Image (cartoon, grey):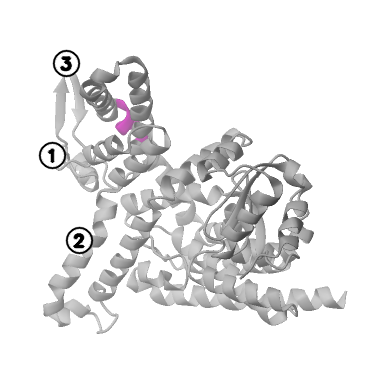
Amino acid sequence: MSVNKQSVEKIVEAIGGKENIVAATHCVTRLRFALKDEGKVNKEALESIDIVKGSFSANGQFQVVIGQGLVDKVYNEMVEMTGIGRATKQEIKDAAEAKLNPLQRAIKTLADIFIPILPAIVTAGLLMGINNVLTGPGIFYEDKSFVQVHKEWADLASIINLIANTAFVFLPGLIGWSAVNKFGGSPLLGIVLGLMLVHPDLLNAWGWGAAKQEGNIPVWNLFGLEIQKVGYQGQVLPVLAASYVLAKIEIFLRKRIPDAFQLLLVAPFALLITGFLAFIAIGPVTFAIGNTITNVFVGIFDNAPAIGGFIYGALYAPLVVTGMHHTFLPVDLQLISSTGGTFLWPILVMSNIAQGSAALAMMFLAKDEKLKGLSFTSAVSAYLGITEPAMFGVNLRFRYPFIAAMTGAAIAGMFITFNKVIAPSIGVGGLPGFLSIVPQKWMPFFIGMAIAIVVPIVLTSIFAKLKKDQ
């Protein structure tokens, strides 16, 4: 598809002119801008341009959805037309980050750490879902699992389970790699740090509770100090805090040790100091904090499951708009580690499906062919777990589909939480999400999915009719 120069001119004009652009780059589907003043953007004019499929602001960046293949042509034409310099994605991130407040920076930091490891976690969740199908009783045979009836499949299920569990067992290694890289240290040292926290010589974190009750937790004796030899499998906060410390120590040493001695001194000292701090202070303190956070969420959802599910279901989509939804992935992982499953992630699935359903309703209601096409493709995307096209391209633009989706997600979230639906792993946050749910809770989960499909479609249609009648 060729690029119409007039369309590119209109994009530049709609975002406030070239003088409003601090820097610009693009990804696979979107133009990404760091703007001086996002208040100068004319969203209505921008989204009326034929090649624009939607726009939104996230993490200090203003992003314009163009589409795969066409976006690089639009970007090249825009650079030639305006004379702005080509920027890397990191330069755009740096320019955008300078405008964020401390809370936004903290949220963005979490996003930058967890998004790179999300494919591994989702893949593990899908594989665990396959294992759940094979080993869950009552799915194919009454009171028996598939592998109990067909024993020749048992070892295959065992291998699948081992492959799936790897990302969760060695989760601190994944987080250590990503976190140390984000904090400016060497990613390889982050991997070593994360794996150190789950070393086989340490008491497995999942056996800590039983060992504590029996009073036989192994310890190190260091100059009068008793330090528990406990691993941090599945834990998030210990490795996050230790990664920050490791990166800062490494940066400190690199600035002060001559290049000739850095290989011999920087990594050993950084790991040694961080290792001692991790087992003596960082690990025990953050482990306690993590358990407290878990207990707070479990307490809320145990005492008022319907209210908790309703509120989280209603608010999850607005959290995505602000970027704050990234703060709940560590909570999900902590819940999986501490209690065997998360009740928050299934509600996320309901929210994603609800946003897709509202967008799907708009496909039938819209008269504009461009909007029809965008509504359909974004609905499919949301049903597969990616909601940004549906939310920013369709639902938020008209508002009432977004409200309808929030309502459907709230009701569905209330229903599945009341029925104690949990996910022992994180998978695809859409229609395939049932694979990550414990098989015994599939039925209430499917009913919740039906609510998340039907309610937004019906409400969007009603709101559209009321708006037309006014």
* Label number found at residue 223: 3
Quarter of the image where the N terminus is located:
bottom right
> Which of pointers 2 and 1 indicates the residue nearer the eye?
2
Residue 405 vertical position relative to residue 171 in the rendered view, above or below: below
- Residue 381 relative to residue 396: left or right: left
Q: CA distance from mark 3 to mark 1?
A: 21 Å
Residue 212 vertical position relative to residue 325 in the rendered view, above or below: above
* Label number found at residue 162: 2
- Residue 419 relative to residue 101: left or right: left
What's the amino acid at mark 1? Asp
Q: Secondary structure at mark 2?
A: helix
- Residue 378 relative to residue 119: left or right: right
The residue sitting at 17% across, 39% down in the picture is 202
Query: Which residue does the numbered mark 1 point to in the structure image?
Result: 201
The residue sitting at 76% across, 65% down in the picture is 48
The region drawn magenta spans 281-286
Q: Secondary structure at mark 1?
A: loop
What's the amino acid at mark 3? Phe
Q: Please give the count of numbered marks on the rendered protein.
A: 3
